[in-house]
Amino acid sequence: MTSTPLLLTNKKDTIMKTKELSHAAQNLVIYVRNECEIYDRYTLEAVAMVVKAKCTNDINGARLDDVTAWDNLSFWIGWQTVTKKAIQAAAKLVRKYDHITPTAADIEAATKVYAANIIDKAKYQIRRDKQEKLGRLKHELQNYIDNASFGLPETRRRNMILLHWDIRKFERELQNA
């Protein structure tokens, strides 16, 4: 048995609760994380769903504030259809190759670890997308500066100011992420 992170709470204090996982649960986690077909078919889709939900702060039609959205995602994603299918596919592999039948407790523990893993991947994806957008904004601002002549029209000045504001906004969001 090994100590494995099960849940991530809110983004300010990342507290990991640990629980001893059985051999079957460990194998489930290994197959869910490392099996290429499970990753391509289920994990990528689950990450995309979480990113979409986080970006719109919209889970099952309810508008949520930032902290509540992150707090509820690990529970929410744990019971989504995609996640269940991934765990079921991993359970089939555990039965086939390891000749172990995972119990309901093993499946629940592996689902929580999988949900935490999906949330970590989604957080990384969101941060990477923001960094790319910040880079594009900085590049666009530099193009405005490079192509500017001495007397800029008012609209170009306004666009430059708006770009500066967008850049500052994304820099603050990246620092707080």
Image (cartoon, rainbow, N blue to C red):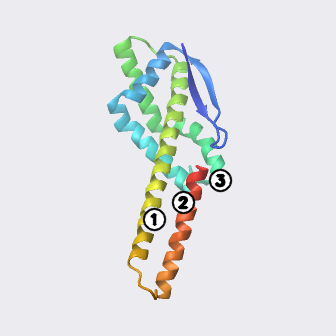
How many neighbours does mark 1 have within 10 angstroms: few (below 14), some (14-19), or many (20 or more)? some
Q: Quadrant of residue 39?
A: top left
Give the residue displayed 46% in from the left and 82% down from the top. Answer: 156
The amino acid pointed to by label 3 is Asp
In the displayed structure, 1 sits above or below 159; it is above
Of circles 1 and 3, the one toward us is: 1
Give the residue displayed 44% in from the left and 38% down from the top. Answer: 82
Which residue in the structure is indicated by mark 3? 65
In whole angstroms, how far apart are the C-alphas of marks 2 and 1? 11 Å
Q: Quadrant of residue 35?
A: top left
Q: 33 left or right of 158?
A: left
In whole angstroms, how far apart are the C-alphas of marks 2 and 3? 18 Å
In the displayed structure, 99 sits above or below 37; it is above
Q: 31 left or right of 14?
A: left
Who comes first in sequence, dot 2 or dot 1?
Answer: 1
Query: In this view of the protein, which residue sits in the foreground, 51 or 106?
Result: 51
The amino acid pointed to by label 2 is Phe
The dot on residue 170 is 2
Who comes first in sequence, dot 2 or dot 3?
Answer: 3
Q: Position of residue 143 (x, y in %)?
A: 39, 72
Identify the element where label 3 is drawn: loop
Which residue in the structure is indicated by mark 1? 138
Q: Position of residue 102 (x, y in %)?
A: 47, 17
